[in-house]
């Protein structure tokens, strides 16, 4: 499992354990699974999605940053445009 945090300047949108995370990197979208190598990447406009068991949740974001280290994923976004 991964610990995911999705944060905007206004509030913490989500914090919890997930199976996988998909993010819209500025150089291309990518997926984060358990034991992913550490990475910091900028995000472009697109969907941030996470999956818990068979449930998938998606948010349309305008941009931001993602940091992955030691099975923790922190997504900092400027704002969430809508829940997809």
Image (cartoon, rainbow, N blue to C red):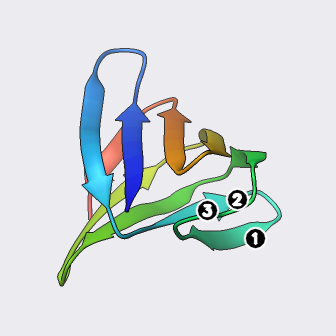
The reply to whether callout 1 and callout 2 are in contact (CB within 8 Å) is yes
Q: Nearer the viewer, residue 67 or 10?
A: 67
- The quadrant holding residue 25 is bottom right
Q: Vertically, is 11 above or below 52?
A: above
Quarter holding the C terminus is bottom left
- Cα distance, mark 3 to mark 1? 6 Å
Q: Which mark is residue 59?
A: none
Position of residue 67 measured from the top left corner of the image (x, y, whole percent): 65, 40
Question: Label 3: how many residues lie within 10 Å, few (<14), some (14-19) or many (20+)?
Answer: many
Position of residue 71 measured from the top left corner of the image (x, y, whole percent): 53, 51
Q: Nearer the viewer, residue 59 or 34?
A: 34
Name the residue: 53% across, 61% down: 46
- Cα distance, mark 1 to mark 2? 5 Å
Name the outermost residue toward the bottom. Answer: 54
Q: Which residue is mark 3?
A: 24
Name the residue: 51% across, 29% down: 78
Position of residue 13 measured from the top left corner of the image (x, y, whole percent): 26, 34
In the visual, does 7 lie left or right of 11? right
Question: Label 2: how many residues lie within 10 Å, few (<14), some (14-19) or many (20+)?
Answer: many
Name the residue: 40% across, 25% down: 8
As helix, strand or loop, the secondary structure at mark 1 comes to strand
In the visual, does 65 lie left or right of 52? right
Q: Which mark is residue 28?
A: 1
The reply to whether callout 3 and callout 2 are in contact (CB within 8 Å) is yes
- The quadrant holding residue 64 is top right
The reply to whether callout 3 and callout 1 are in contact (CB within 8 Å) is no
Q: Which residue is mark 2?
A: 25
Quarter holding the N terminus is bottom left
Q: Vertically, is 22 above or below 26?
A: below
């Amino acid at each position: 499992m991964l610990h995911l945090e999705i944060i905007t300047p206004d509030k913490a949108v989500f914090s919890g354990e997930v199976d996988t995370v998909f993010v819209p990197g500025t150089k291309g979208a990518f997926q984060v699974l358990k034991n992913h190598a550490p990475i910091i990447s900028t995000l472009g406009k697109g969907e941030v999605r996470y999956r818990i068991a068979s449930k998938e949740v998606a948010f349309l974001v305008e941009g931001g940053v993602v940091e992955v280290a030691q099975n923790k994923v922190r997504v900092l976004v400027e704002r969430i445009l809508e829940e997809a």
